[in-house]
Image: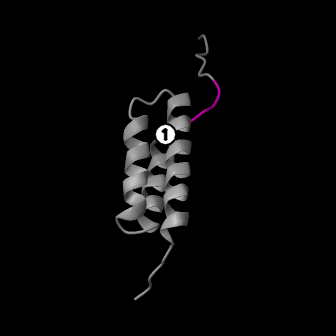
Amino acid sequence: MVEITIPVFLAVPLALLGAAWIYRDASKRKMSTADMWAVGFFVGFFVPPFIGGLVVYALYLRKRNRRGGTVYTVPE
C-alpha cells in the first residue's frame, strides 16, 4: 500500500492556495460554480489526502470555460 503523508502545516496552506487559485480563475471565467469548485478542492485535498485535491483540480480544468477567441460567423 502506498501512503502519501503531508504535514498539516504544509497541507493547509497548499489546500488554501489551490482553492484560492481555482476560485479566482473560475470567477474570471464567469463560472457560477466558482465557490463550489474551491470548496470541493479544499475538502478533496483532505478526504483522500493530496490525491483527492488532484482529482478535483483535474475535473475543474476539464470543466472550466476555455479562454480563447471569439466565434465569428461567415456570411454566405
Magenta residues, start to end:
64-69
The quadrant in which the C terminus is found is top right
Q: Secondary structure at mark 1?
A: loop
Say whether residue 55 is magenta: no
**Residue 45, image x and y in percent?**
43, 60
Q: Going 55% across and 65% down the picture, which residue do you hit?
A: 10
How many numbered circles are shown?
1
Residue sticking out furthest to the left: 47
Q: Nearer the viewer, residue 74 or 7?
A: 7
Residue sticking out furthest to the bottom: 1
- Colour logic: one colour
Please tell me in which quadrant of the rendered image residue 55 appears.
bottom left
Q: Going 62% across and 22% down the picture, which residue do you hit?
A: 70
**Residue 42, image x and y in percent?**
42, 53
The quadrant in which the N terminus is found is bottom left
Q: Which residue is mark 1?
A: 64
Q: Nearer the viewer, residue 76 or 40?
A: 40
Q: In terms of secondary structure, what is the magenta stretch mainly?
A: loop
Q: Going 40% across and 29% down the picture, which residue do you hit?
A: 32
Q: Going 37% across and 55% down the picture, which residue do you hit?
A: 43
Residue sticking out furthest to the right: 69
Q: Residues within 10 Å of mark 1 (few under 14, many from 20)?
A: some
**Residue 31, image x and y in percent?**
45, 30
Amino acid marked by disc 1: Arg
From this view, report whether residue 15 is shown above or below residue 36: below
Say whether residue 68 is magenta: yes
Residue sticking out furthest to the top: 75
